[in-house]
Image: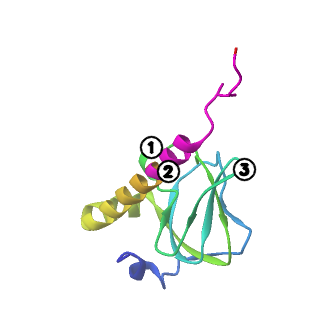
């Protein structure tokens, strides 16, 4: 992902120890993150939805809909993440159109994964018992 090299050595990079949370479900959200190194588990309830890897954005919905976090993000191993606040996000979108496409691709991929999870989940009321 081309954006990764822009932020790898930035002073704002945050180290996150294995098992620590980058953010939690319901947190007020003012930044998204780019994973510089390591893996981050995206968790909804007790379900691991995705393991995000180096070069992946997490928490991007925060800068799009201004709502609380819709999932938790926990470091699977020691990680380094780069926070992107709203001002930087707006600047990157306007100055680097490819950045906006990367964020949209991330959103689309996550939506497809959630669609797949939902389509394979047991249906409510589908007990298989005859009436």
- Circle 2 sits on which residue? 62
In the image, residue 58 above or below residue 44: below
SS at mark 3 in the image: loop
Q: Which residue is mark 3?
A: 46
Task: Where is residue 34? Give x, y as percent.
Answer: 49, 69
Tell which of 131 and 32 is nearer to you: 131
- Callout 1 touching callout 2 (CB < 8 Å): yes
Instruction: Where is residue 41? Give x, y as percent.
Output: 63, 63
Instruction: Looking at the image, tell me whether mark 3 or mark 1 is earlier in sequence order.
Output: 3
C-alpha span from label 1 to label 2: 6 Å
Left or right: 58 with respect to 21?
left
Q: Give the spatial CA distance, label 3 vs label 1.
A: 24 Å
- Name the side, left or right, on which 101 lies relative to 10: left
Quarter of the image for the N terminus: give it. bottom left
Disc 1 marks which residue?
A: 65
- Residue 11 covered by magenta stretch: no
Quadrant the C terminus occupies: top right
Q: Categorize mark 3 by other alpha carbons within 10 Å: few (<14), some (14-19), many (20+).
A: few
Residue 110: horizontal and vertical position, in percent? Answer: 47, 54
State the separation of the CA atoms marked 3 and 2: 21 Å
Q: Position of residue 74 (x, y in %)?
A: 67, 63
- Label 1: few (<14), some (14–19) or many (≥20) C-alpha neighbours in 10 Å: few
Task: Work out whether mark 3 precedes mark 2 in sequence or the reverse, and give the earlier one.
Answer: 3
Do callouts 3 and 1 mark residues in contact (Cβ within 8 Å)?
Answer: no
Regarding mark 2 in the picture, which secondary structure is present there?
helix
Mark whose residue sits in front, 3 or 2: 3
Report the span colored magenta.
Answer: 112-130
């Amino acid at each position: 992902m081309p954006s990764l090299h822009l932020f790898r050595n930035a002073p704002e990079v945050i180290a996150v120890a294995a098992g620590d949370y980058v953010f939690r479900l319901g947190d007020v959200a003012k930044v998204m993150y780019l994973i510089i190194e390591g893996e981050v588990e995206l968790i909804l309830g007790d379900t691991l939805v995705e393991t995000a890897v180096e070069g992946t954005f997490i928490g991007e919905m925060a800068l799009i809909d201004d709502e609380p976090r819709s999932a938790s993000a926990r470091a699977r191993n020691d990680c380094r993440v780069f926070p992107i606040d709203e001002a930087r996000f707006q600047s990157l979108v306007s100055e680097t159109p490819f950045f906006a496409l990367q964020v949209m691709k991330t959103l689309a991929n996550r939506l497809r994964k959630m669609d797949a999870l939902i389509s394979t989940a047991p249906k409510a009321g589908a007990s298989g018992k005859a009436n």
